[in-house]
Amino acid sequence: MSANMSGLGDDAALPLEEAQALALWTFVSVNIPRFNSATAREVVAAVAPHREESLKVVAKRLRRELAARGVHLKHVHSLDAASRIFGHNSWYAARRATARLRLRLTSASEVEEPDEEFASWEDLAPRLCELCVAAVAEAEATVVQVKFGPAFMMLGVPSLLRVGDVERTEFAPILFVNPIGDPESWLDDSPATLEHLRRVLEETGLAVLDGVAVLQLCDRRTHGPVPQPVRPSDAANSELILLREDNGVDSYEIARGDELICWSQIELAEKYRAIEIELEEGAWLVGGGRYVWRVATLHPKDYVPGLVTYGLSARESESLLRRYRLAKRVLSGPLKHHEVTKRLQYLGQPSDTWRVDMHKLLLLVDKAGLKWDDYDAQGDWATGKPLSQLPVGVVMSLLERLNLPDPNVVLARPSRAELTRVGNDELLRALVPRVDHVTYRVSSDLSDEQKKVVREAIEEFAASMQLQKRVEGGAITFEGDPLPYLVYAGDGEELRLKLDAKGLVMFAGVMPRLFKTEGIIEKVDNMWPFALGHTLYLDVAPR
């Protein structure tokens, strides 16, 4: 980042030429005693610095003028000398003084503290480390989790809560970091700062920094090409994938999520025995198994997200193994993690608008004796989008007044062209942990036998999905070890193969899903009578 004198403000003035010469002479003469004040005045007059100039440009001119007088400075020293001419103590002080503030740090401490603002991730790093180290000591924690969102980074520690006889682990925030201004590329320079924090925590044995790996792996600018651009800002929609691939062809998924989720699942798959891991071309060799690492990144779109998957290089896999061994020392025993599914930005929050079946909605409005024109005039919700794309609040308000048995009938279903053909279960594995329901339709030219196969296969798939969610939510518990993730990971491929055996193919996408809360959740004023979720939408047709 180059310092620019315009950053000093319109009222800021440069020191007088005599003061500039004195500052230059003081800096240079410490190491070059023959440099006198008269020469310093000559140099300042020849350089003629102007406050609108980049400090780096002035430093280059200063270096040239000094060299002409037999004083040779390295580039970094010429930056320091130029900074002193402009009235700063050092190049770093000049850069901080003229840099635009880009990051805001908010402490989650119970003691109210003012927000702090920083010009760069590099400037933020010491404060980030200070707060995390203090929080780890206060909470006696051994794990610090980092979570990413569209315009935030949040760090916190897992906290054990007891309600009666029930224990559950929740995330207790330490701090939040947000961009100041445009969030488009605000995370681009963050990997180095998070790596610095990781070293402070992990290399000293204080705690494990969980969730940092995907940020570093999304920084693909120095890791070679990938099918679609992947940047640090994609960390909010990215996760590690651990596959067992014994013969190099067939593979099955062991885990997906952040580091601790995957490490705990590999130990669960190996029955917590003392596992010795060796590396072979980037693969982890554990006993008789060969485990390989990948990263999956979802790029949100209307019905079907873009999915980018890429493998870790041998160096990245080795680095992750080294971190696993550090984690074993920090946590002192089998690695267990309270989360099974990582929360992603994609499908983690409702969208601003929904597509509706406008024809059906208008019929229902008319049948209920409501007047659309009157209702439309009551609110200013013009979005500039097609009429079938309505703000979520408008749709919810209408549905509350219509009081339909199934509110989902007004939501537009995607056409087959808007879905993607399921050639393998890669996309399903990424989507299933993030949806709450399965909806399907079948082609009209399917036989009765084929329709029965579809119904039974999807019902079995949906039942397994709901079982998984109940287990994850604590509604169903097992004595001893929890069920490993791999028990459910192959459900999507099993469904695909059942349909394929009957000459059928499915197309998949995701759409919103509404659940009526009447009789389930106590009615509260100013709260919609629906829970929001998402459904996996399948369209089954002959191959």
Image: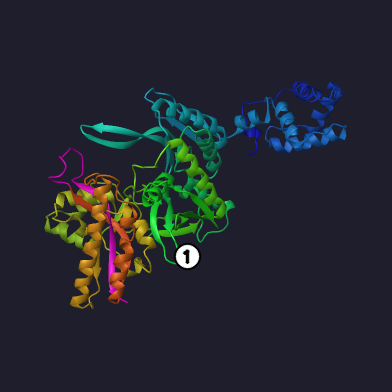
Along the line of sight, which residue is nearer the eye, 378 or 182? 182
Instruction: State yes or no: residue 523 in magenta.
Output: yes
**Residue 326 spot, x, y in % from top left:** 49, 40
Q: Is residue 292 shown above or below 333?
A: below
Please indicate whether residue 5 sits to the left or right of residue 239 in the image.
right
> Which residue appears at 28% of the width and 62% of the height?
537
> Which residue appears at 76% of the width and 38% of the height?
60
Amino acid type of the residue that numbered disc 1 sits on in the rendered structure = Gly
**Residue 199 spot, x, y in % from top left:** 54, 37
Magenta-colored span: 517-543
Residue 162: name its quadrant. top left
Mark yes or no: residue 376 visible.
no
**Residue 91 spot, x, y in % from top left:** 68, 31
Instruction: State yes or no: residue 258 in magenta.
Output: no
Residue where numbered disc 1 is placed = 248
Give the total of numbered labels.
1
Residue 299: name its quadrant. bottom left
Color encoding of the figure? rainbow
